[in-house]
Image: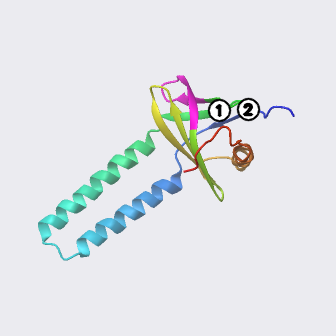
Amino acid sequence: MTSAPAIGFDYSPSRWLRRVLLLVAALAALAVMLCSLPLWPRLALVVVVLLATWRTHRQWVLPVVVAAGWGSGPDWTLHMADNEDVAAELLSFRVLGPFVLLRLSAADRGVHALLLAPDNSDADIRRRLRMRLATVTPGEALPRL
């Protein structure tokens, strides 16, 4: 059997995920405003929701990983925003319909979660990833999310 070809792709955060974040934050703020707490605690909670939303949105807008590649073996490479290539290890993955979620651990760079969705990746790349992830053998023992 021949080895699997390498898979490489550019990565940018999903716009759908950002929109869902803003929708959930708006619903959370609305729920806080409609609860029966006094006015000052409600305002404080709304500020907390808005700050958490701003912080999370800022992290998604400025991605640390700009590209990823999976070699013919278990080797992953992450191309970081500072133009450095870092070796990574696939910790876990999850395939949910057209979405592919990858958790990769890069030495000295922490754990990075990459969500490949229809709005930020090519359908052929996701298909090839799903096919290769399906062939992960039990000896590699990758946990699923």
Quadrant of the image occupied by residue 96: bottom right
Q: CA distance from mark 1 to mark 2?
A: 7 Å
Q: Is residue 107 left or right of residue 52?
A: right
Q: Find disc 1 in the rendering and name its residue.
A: 69
Give residue 118's position: percent from left, percent from top: 63, 54
Q: Find disc 2 in the rendering and name its residue.
A: 6
- Residue at 65% x, 29% y: name it: 75
Circle 2 residues within 10 Å: few <14, some 14–19, many ≥20: few
Query: Is any atom of residue 54 visible in this view?
Result: yes
**Disc 1 secondary structure class:** strand
Look at the image and give the residue range highlighted in magenta.
77-90
**Disc 2 secondary structure class:** loop
Q: In the rendered view of the protein, which quadrant contains the N terminus?
A: top right
- Residue at 23% x, 75% y: name it: 35
Give residue 114's position: percent from left, percent from top: 54, 43
Quick check: marks 1 and 2 in contact, CB under 8 Å? Answer: yes
Q: Is residue 71 left or right of residue 89?
A: right
Q: Amino acid at mark 2?
A: Ala
Give residue 41's position: percent from left, percent from top: 15, 65
Query: Is any atom of residue 101 visible in this view?
Result: no
Q: Is residue 114 magenta?
A: no
Disc tally is: 2
Q: Amino acid at mark 1?
A: Gly
